[in-house]
């Protein structure tokens, strides 16, 4: 794999029982790239993201992240199934932002952002809190450090989830429809934080239905359809000038 590639999928497949959900995904994400995945509901987008950070195992082909084969360990030239502690350590190098924020309801904003630093990386509270405040400031929420999730809007909760996802300086962040659960007036503040990360050179793999945002911020757009990458390219080429009828049909449907 080229050192410019952080993610490389070669014919990656995933089945749930007899149902093949991903049928041979070929995709590369370069370091520093904002890559977007669009496609119909049920086409396998969430499953693809979950395979990258080892929340889901894949069942065929290859999936490389950085310099490792996801789910596998090499010892003396032989491949073995990765031990769970290896998968957990690798996952710590990947940030993930979910549709429904998934903040801990009994922790403050600051505690949510620092939980991984304190509990997984074992940082002393003072060090973790300093980093946590820096991150809250970055997403514009330093003044809500002591608020609990229930006291915050959905947009604020998602900005805290993003701060949490970048706390341990991951090499890539995965976003799974980060604005889909938000009221329309709160979408913009979350996209603004994502735009800022992309501008800063963060490697991002984003599943979204925000097509205009994908076109504006994306370096690459992948259209996934029925478990395959039907089309990849520069955003304008895929979104405006696609010759693939399935892409055009999908875009027309979500613009209605
Ligand atoms: P998308 O995110 O594109 O909407 P998903 O990756 O969530 O699609 O799901 C793709 C397909 O895989 C769907 O048909 C879904 O029902 C199925 N699926 C997802 N997770 C599971 C699971 N844990 N067990 C069985 N089927 C699943
Ligand atoms: Mg999904």
Image (tube, rainbow, N blue to C red):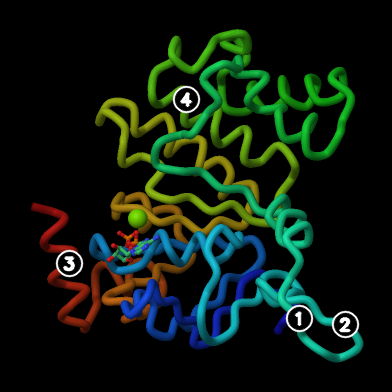
From the Cβ of disc 1, is ligand 1 less than 8 Å away?
no
Task: Calculate the distance from the C-alpha at mark 3 to the C-alpha at mark 4.
Answer: 30 Å
Q: Looking at the picture, how far across and down is residue 102, in whole percent?
A: 49, 34
Which residue is at the far bottom?
Answer: 77
Asked if residue 111 lies left or right of residue 61, the reply is: right
Picture quadrant where residue 228 is located: bottom left
Secondary structure, mark 3, is: helix
Which residue is at the far front?
Answer: 17
User: In the figure, 88 relative to 248: above or below?
Assistant: above
Task: Calculate the distance from the C-alpha at mark 4 to the C-alpha at mark 2.
Answer: 42 Å
Look at mark 2 in the image and give the residue it sits on.
75
Residue at 36%, 50% in the rendered image: 213
Residue at 56%, 16% in the rendered image: 106
Picture quadrant where residue 41 is located: bottom left
Asked if residue 206 lies left or right of residue 64, the reply is: left
Q: Looking at the picture, how far across and down is residue 113, in whole percent?
A: 66, 27
Asked if residue 241 lies left or right of residue 16, the reply is: left
Task: Calculate the distance from the C-alpha at mark 1 to the C-alpha at mark 4.
Answer: 39 Å
Look at mark 1 in the image and give the residue it sits on.
80
The crowding category of the residue bearing disc 2, from other C-alpha atoms within 10 Å (few below 14, some 14 to 19, many at least 20), is: few
Task: Calculate the distance from the C-alpha at mark 2 to the C-alpha at mark 3.
Answer: 45 Å
The crowding category of the residue bearing disc 3, from other C-alpha atoms within 10 Å (few below 14, some 14 to 19, many at least 20), is: some
Secondary structure, mark 2, is: strand
Q: Which of marks 3 and 4 is in front?
A: 4
> Which one is in front, 102 or 6?
102
Look at mark 4 in the image and give the residue it sits on.
157
User: In the figure, 134 relative to 4: above or below?
Assistant: above
Task: Calculate the distance from the C-alpha at mark 3 to the C-alpha at mark 1.
Answer: 40 Å
Look at mark 3 in the image and give the residue it sits on.
250
Secondary structure, mark 1, is: strand
């Amino acid at each position: 794999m080229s050192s410019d590639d952080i993610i490389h999928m070669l014919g990656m497949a995933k089945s749930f029982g007899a149902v093949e959900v991903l049928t041979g995904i070929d995709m590369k994400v370069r370091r520093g790239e904002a890559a977007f995945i669009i496609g119909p509901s049920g086409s396998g987008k969430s499953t693809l993201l979950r395979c990258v950070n080892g929340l889901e195992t894949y069942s065929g082909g290859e999936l490389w992240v950085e310099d490792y084969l996801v789910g596998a360990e090499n010892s003396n030239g032989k491949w073995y199934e990765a031990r769970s502690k290896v998968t957990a350590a690798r996952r710590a190098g990947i940030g993930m932002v979910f549709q429904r924020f998934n903040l801990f309801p009994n922790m403050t904003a600051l505690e949510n952002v620092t939980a991984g630093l304190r509990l997984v990386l074992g940082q002393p509270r003072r060090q973790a809190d300093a980093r946590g405040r820096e991150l809250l400031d970055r997403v514009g929420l330093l003044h809500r450090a002591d608020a609990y999730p229930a006291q915050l809007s959905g947009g604020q909760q998602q900005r805290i989830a993003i701060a949490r996802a970048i706390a341990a300086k991951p090499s890539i962040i995965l976003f799974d429809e980060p604005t889909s659960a938000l009221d329309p007036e709160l979408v913009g503040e979350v996209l603004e934080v994502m735009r800022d990360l992309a501008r800063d050179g963060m490697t991002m793999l984003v599943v979204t239905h925000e097509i205009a945002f994908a076109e504006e911020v994306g370096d690459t757009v992948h259209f996934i359809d029925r478990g395959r990458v039907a089309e990849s390219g520069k955003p304008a080429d895929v979104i405006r000038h696609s010759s693939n009828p399935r892409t055009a049909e999908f875009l027309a449907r979500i613009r209605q």
